[in-house]
Amino acid sequence: MGSAFAFHWLASAPAGDLVLVDVDADAVQAQLMDLQHLRGLGARPGVRIGSTEALAEADVVVVAASLSAPAGPDRAAMVTRNAGLLAGLLPNLRLVRPDALVVVATNPVDAITTLVVDSGSLRAEQVLGLSLNDTLRFRAALAQHFGVEIGRVEGWNLGQHGGAQVPVYSAVSVDGRPRSVAPADRPPIDSYLADWFRSYQELRPGRSTGWASAAGIGRMIDTWWNRRPAPLPCSRVLGGEYGLKGVALGVPVDLSGDRPAVVELRLTGAEEAGLLRAGEAVGRAVRALRDAVARERGDA
Ligand SMILES: NC(=O)c1ccc[n+]([C@@H]2O[C@H](COP(=O)([O-])OP(=O)(O)OC[C@H]3O[C@@H](n4cnc5c(N)ncnc54)[C@H](O)[C@@H]3O)[C@@H](O)[C@H]2O)c1
């Protein structure tokens, strides 16, 4: 997925330099050899291989490293898979500039986003997890329900990425006009959300979702860099918003100011309860992952 992002960014960004950091020297060299030829097709940014020292200079850091093979359908089993990677990565993130943006894609994304902020050197508002796909899937299902193009639909799927999700039926609109979805019409939409990842994996694609994820990271960076006004769904450590504190969850984030801020939608009681359940689920994942990272470091 990191290479899909690299391709997307090089092909679309107006300027800049992309530094690739990967422990697999041959694989990253092969990616570089391929990506460099984009310049011959008009790509404007440069691209090179670097080390973690590049973190100290970066405006934006994208964390897409993973120890695991492409995720299986059981995300719960994936919770501690990247503990060894995090044990090495978290201290390195101290190099990141206080005004830089860190985008975390690696799963479990909400728990890792939480641990990155907990590790102490970065502020909650500069560390955003990739949870945009959950909302894209909700909008795709809503578009099918209403019989319209997905781009005309607004709707938010909050909560835990790929886990305890909260599709916010109370704030759905088409062409900017509020639309309701009758409770009787919701089960197929909920099933689509619950089953999407399993259906994808059953096709044995041999990789995690790359294209929409790569474009999603690109959208997050473009929105932040250009201070664009439309909020985006991102996993962000909450500081009391939605009644939750100290865990990262997918929520709308306004990236137009100097400090990306959580946007609080007006939720129904059931939606609020769902978000609290999501917070508890991420809290459990954070504890499991924190313990596993401590074991990896040998301090537990
Ligand atoms: N949040 C989302 O919506 C979303 C979407 C897609 C993928 N993902 C996650 O992104 C991660 C990457 O997925 P992928 O399919 O690209 O995996 P992948 O196995 O294809 O690639 C992972 C890469 O990380 C490298 N790596 C391992 N340890 C490293 C380290 N310490 N430093 C630098 N590089 C290191 C590996 O060499 C490999 O090239 C996974 O955790 C996946 O679940 C998240």
Image (tube, helix red, strand yellow):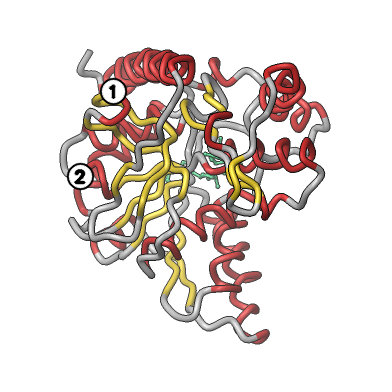
* Residue 123 tag number: 2
Q: Nearer the viewer, residue 124 or 206?
A: 124
299, above or below 88, in the image: above
Q: Does dot 1 land on a helix, a strand or a loop?
A: loop
Question: Could you tell me residue 225's position as x and y percent?
Answer: 37, 67
Question: Could you tell me residue 112's position as x and y percent?
Answer: 37, 32
90, above or below 196, in the image: below
Instruction: Tell me what residue is drawn at x 43 percent, y 16 percent.
Output: 269
Of circles 1 and 2, the one toward us is 1
Instruction: Tell me what residue is drawn at x 53 percent, y 43 percent.
Output: 132
Q: Nearer the viewer, residue 230 or 74?
A: 230
Quarter of the image for residue 247 reads top left
Q: Does dot 2 land on a helix, a strand or a loop?
A: loop
According to the image, label 1 marks what residue? 244
Query: Within 10 Å of the Cα at label 1, are there few (<14), some (14-19), or many (20+) other Cα atoms?
Result: some
Kind of residue at badge 2 = Arg
Task: Work out whether mark 1 precedes mark 2 in sequence or the reverse, and give the earlier one.
Answer: 2
- The quarter of the rendered structure image containing the C terminus is top left
Query: Within 10 Å of the Cα at label 2, are there few (<14), some (14-19), or many (20+) other Cα atoms?
Result: some
Instruction: Tell me what residue is drawn at x 57 percent, y 40 percent.
Output: 155
| Badge 1 vs badge 2, beta-carbon distance below 8 Å | no
27, above or below 92, in the image: below
Question: Could you tell me residue 78's position as x and y percent?
Answer: 53, 22
